[in-house]
Amino acid sequence: MNISLSDWLTVLLHFVSMSLFAIGGAIALIPEFHRFFIEEHAWLTESQFSSGIALAQASPGPNALMLAMMGWNFGMNATPAGYSHFVFGFFGFVSCLLCVLTPSCVLTFTATRWVQKNNEKMGVIAFKKGLAPVVIGSMLVSSWVIVRGDFVLANNWQVWLIALTTLVLVWGTKIHILWLLAGGAAIGASGLLGSF
Amino acid sequence: MEQKVSIAQKGPKSLAELYWALTKLALQGFGGVFPVAQRVLVEERKWFTQQVFLEEWAVAQVLPGPNIVNLSVMFGSRWFGAMGALVAVAGIFSMPALLLILVAIFFEQFREYPAVAGALHGMGAVSAGLIAGTSLKMAGSLKAHPLTFFGAIAFTVVTFILLAVFKFPLIPVLLVMGTSSVLITYLKIKHSHGVKGGE
């Protein structure tokens, strides 16, 4: 993949500009980064995108690390011939994470006192409650974009079955997330899923 | 307000203690850190009372950015100012990031093997289910929404269609759908207050 310095700038600027729109958390940004990285620019593959998210979920820490994994894979793809993929991956990981965190952290640092003082005001309550249904909509799109790639491949109905089973288990039981991921990994490793 | 501050005076003694507490917390959090944050900060360390923690969490949710990151910024700056905020964010990210990079390198080495590629594919499917399940759990909280349950769900569905089917970028969708939802919610709340005789 031929990726120039200005492409790097485009990516980092996108992370910066999405920071303040991460309302409801990092997961709500997944559809936007899918659109940006895969549909608009073809800088990541569907498989990199979804496995990056899966690995971030399988290892502990804040969900924002899912976004850092997109930077990781972008860096790996952007590595010029003769250089180490991991060095560029690491740079992508760290720089994208810093870019998506900095604006919202600065805002929180400066605005906390104001929100604490006005948290009971009607406008602030309306802001919080009014955004909730919209945020839930964009979170649902996040899971949709991860499996949509398989939708086109009609033979991958198994992927949909796994996703739906997980959904029911998450909703109805308190089973630990690692068991679910391990189950998915085992089914996938045994070759029961179609290829990407 | 004054009382709230005095209750929560018992905090970390040094930046190092703050860093390690948050590192430990983050390393226990799979698929989101909120439940762990509550247990560690309120029950184990007793740096917050339950009530203050929930109040801080409500503020962290209003502000843009990942909630747990906002909470760390608020939490760190409460005791050590800007330096505290920086150390707190470094605390929740540094070790998990390092670990995740090691995991990613490991998988990258073996990506060519069909079993590993298959395992990643299966985990991706589980991720999708996890996120959908969490979203639907959150949707349950819309039952008591000022817009009524169906009104709120209508906003969820239209947002979904705009992003998933029409593939609009997030910013215009958030601006249009978010603004109209917030506005109508505001009018509804104001109206119900008005009926009861003002704010």
Image (cartoon, coloured by chain):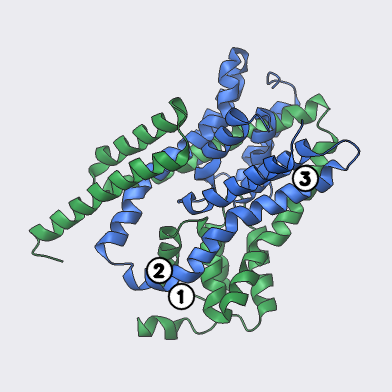
Chain colours: A blue, B green
What chain is tagged by disc 3? A
At label 3, the amino acid type is Gly
Q: Is residue A79 something one can see in this rendering?
A: yes
**Splitting the image into 4 quarters, where does residue B24 fall?**
bottom right
Crowding near pointer 3: few (<14 within 10 Å), some, many (20+)? many
> For this rendering, which residue is in front, A43 or B68?
A43
Query: Is residue B84 placed above or below B32 in the rendered structure?
Result: below
Callout 2: helix, strand or loop? helix
Left or right, residue A58 beside residue B1? right
The residue depicted at 53 percent of the width and 72 percent of the height is B75
Work out whether residue B77 or residue B100 is closer to the camera in this orientation and state it: B77
Chain ID, mark 2:
B
- Residue A52 sits above or below residue A192 on the image: below
The residue indicated by pointer 1 is: B49
Q: CA distance from mark 2 to mark 3?
A: 38 Å
Q: Which residue is mark 2?
A: B55
Within 10 Å of the Cα at label 1, are there few (<14), some (14-19), or many (20+) other Cα atoms? some
Please tell me the numbered disc located at residue A89: 3
The answer to whether dots 3 and 1 both sit on one chain is: no
Percent coordinates x, y for residue A82 in the rendering: 91, 38
Residue A178 image position (x, y, % from top left): 65, 44
Amino acid type at image mark 2: Glu
Given this view, does label 2 or label 1 mark the residue nearer the observer?
2
